Image (tube, helix red, strand yellow):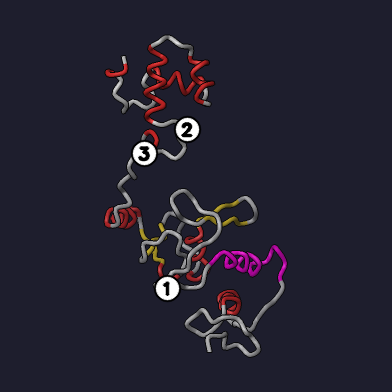
Amino acid sequence: MNVCIINYCTNIKHSRQGWCEKHYKRWLIHGDPNKCNKFSESSASYVKNRFYSYVCIPDENGCMEWTGAKHNSGYGTFSLKGSILIKAHRYSYELFKGKFNNELHVLHTCDNPKCVAPQHLYLGKDKENARDRIERNRHINPPVRRGSENNKSKLTESNVIEIIEMLNMKLSERFIAKKFGVTKNSIHSIKHNKTWSHIDRSVQK
């Protein structure tokens, strides 16, 4: 049967041990899938329980992905005592393997920034971190998205060509901005080639 092996539990089995997600997380927190204690918000067990409420059970690769808040880099972030933020994978390493020198990096064997599985984490110095980034091409900045390829852009290339033509006709920046639903500063930046500089303006004059 594809259900949890714990007596009287009818939840779907997820872990290799045969437990459902609820009992798997109890085992992670207490070391016993049957143990379920209530604890105060100031207790270490409360923080640990809150941490694992954002953690998925292992997938086919053994990764335990973080479902909580994430940094732009893709790494999970976890709040300690309200205002103290820590990267989720660093906190996971500390939970399972003990405190470590804060100057060290916590690296992944799985190349999955969202993963907090302790068996996928290891410590490294700046040198190891740099080598890891190079080997996995993380040192290469993503291509710059210009013009309409930038999802935040309100304008398209054809809009900008029309704006340049209107500027050449000496129409006011305020009028043009209102027509296209953008700020006057946006039009000013186009006029002085600070933005949309990849547009060939020679054919517009």
The image shows residue 49, relative to residue 194, as above or below, that is below
Residue 145's tag is 3
Residue 146 is situated, as x and y percent measured from the top left of the image, at: 36, 35
Q: Are marks 2 and 3 in contact (CB under 8 Å)?
A: no
Disc nearer the start of the sequence (2/1): 1
Q: Which residues fall within the magenta stretch?
A: 39-55
Instruction: Please name which of the two marks, 2 or 3, marks the residue nearer to the observer.
Output: 2
Circle 2 crowding by C-alpha within 10 Å: few under 14, some 14–19, many from 20: few
Residue 148 is situated, as x and y percent measured from the top left of the image, at: 40, 35
Residue 23 is situated, as x and y percent measured from the top left of the image, at: 59, 79
Instruction: Please name which of the two marks, 3 or 1, marks the residue nearer to the observer.
Output: 3
Residue under circle 1?
A: 62
Element type at marker 3?
A: loop
Residue under circle 2?
A: 154
The image quadrant that residue 108 belongs to is: bottom left
Which of 83 and 25 lies nearest the eye of the viewer?
25
